Amino acid sequence: MPKTLAALLVLALGFLPGCSASKASSNDKPLVLTTFTVLADIARNVAGDHLAVESITKVGAEIHGYEPTPGDIRKAADADLILDNGLNLELWFEQFVESVDVPHKVVSERVEPMDITEDSYAGKPNPHAWMSPKNVQLYVDAMVDAFSGLDPAHASDFAANGMAYRAALQKVQDELMRNLAAVPKKQRALVSCEGAFSYLARDAGLTEKYLWPVNAEQQATPQQIAAATEFVKANDVPAVFCESTVSDKAMRQVATGTGAEFGGTLYVDSLSAADGPVPTYLDLIRYDADTIVRGLTGDTP
């Protein structure tokens, strides 16, 4: 364990009352902790009123390079169940999750991962599996199992909630396919800052191009900008996009250098605040699909 992490653990656990982490009292709902806001929203739909669900990271946080705080570690030690995405998304979390005595569930365990194909990440799994509503149905199944083990008395409710949410996910999936089918074949290319749309692009029959594979560096190299620029020119891509948790400066440079429109901001790693455009996961998928369609068909506001 890195020394800095060990110091955080000592600091965090030193503030916990008593000799061990204090779990929720018997009168409280069991606490389920997720690594980011998207997972928290999905989990709340499955948990219903029986579990308290919280996200470690806040709205707008960049998940890949997040640096946990002593407060995060205390919260983890106080949870009854921890959910993470897996697929190498939350490497920062993996460093200390095994140091707290809390059950742990990787919700992507049933997903067939797609590999990253470029740069130093080539061959590693693309972690953004939740960008396919079909995959999120598998997340839901994993959550139903985990919640039923945590609170067996409400297992039937978790199963019913999961079935209802799966139906909502399938409806959004069908909407996504129907809307993106309106994009002409010659314009069916999705150019973004991060390679976060591989699963969505696969489902919708879009060709994907990005500046960097994952938001680890958040800085585009001249070579990456040049490659994206060449792709946009070669394929007459009408619009390019960037994600809400990183700077869009490099992608706007691609747009300027090619004559493509900057089609808008897409949401991937974080939901918005309640009064924002994507307060829920279902809103996120609908918003992204609408933004992509508008950009690629020239129907931008």
Image: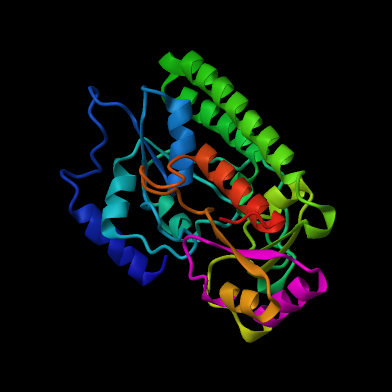
| Residue at x 42%, y 65% (from the top left corner) | 1
- Is 74 positioned to the left or the right of 211 in the image? left
Task: Looking at the picture, tell me which residue is in the foreground, 69 or 226.
Answer: 226
Residue at 58% across, 49% down: 288
Q: Where is residue 186 drawn, in percent x and y?
A: 83, 59
- Picture quarter with the C terminus: bottom right
For the question of whether residue 212 can be seen, the reply is no
Q: Position of residue 290 (x, y in %)?
A: 61, 47
Return the residue nearer the eye: 207 or 20. Answer: 207
Q: Note whether residue 173 is visible.
A: yes
Q: How many marks?
A: 0
Q: Is residue 47 above or below residue 60?
A: above
- Residue 161 in the image: above or below residue 210: above
Horizontal and vertical percent position of residue 36: 44, 49
Instruction: In this rendered view, identify the residue nearer to me: 100 or 280.
Output: 280
In the rendered image, the vertical position of residue 74 relative to residue 26, given as above or below: below
User: Is residue 84 shown left or right of residue 231?
Assistant: left
- Residue at 71 percent across and 62 percent down: it is 116
Task: Magenta stretch: give its range.
Answer: 224-250
Q: Is residue 245 magenta?
A: yes
Q: Nearer the viewer, residue 261 or 281?
A: 261
Give the residue drawn at x 43%, y 46%: 37
Magenta highlight on residue 142: no
Image coordinates of residue 259 in percent, x first then y, are 68, 75
Q: Is residue 259 left or right of residue 14?
A: right
**Colour pattern of the rendering:** rainbow
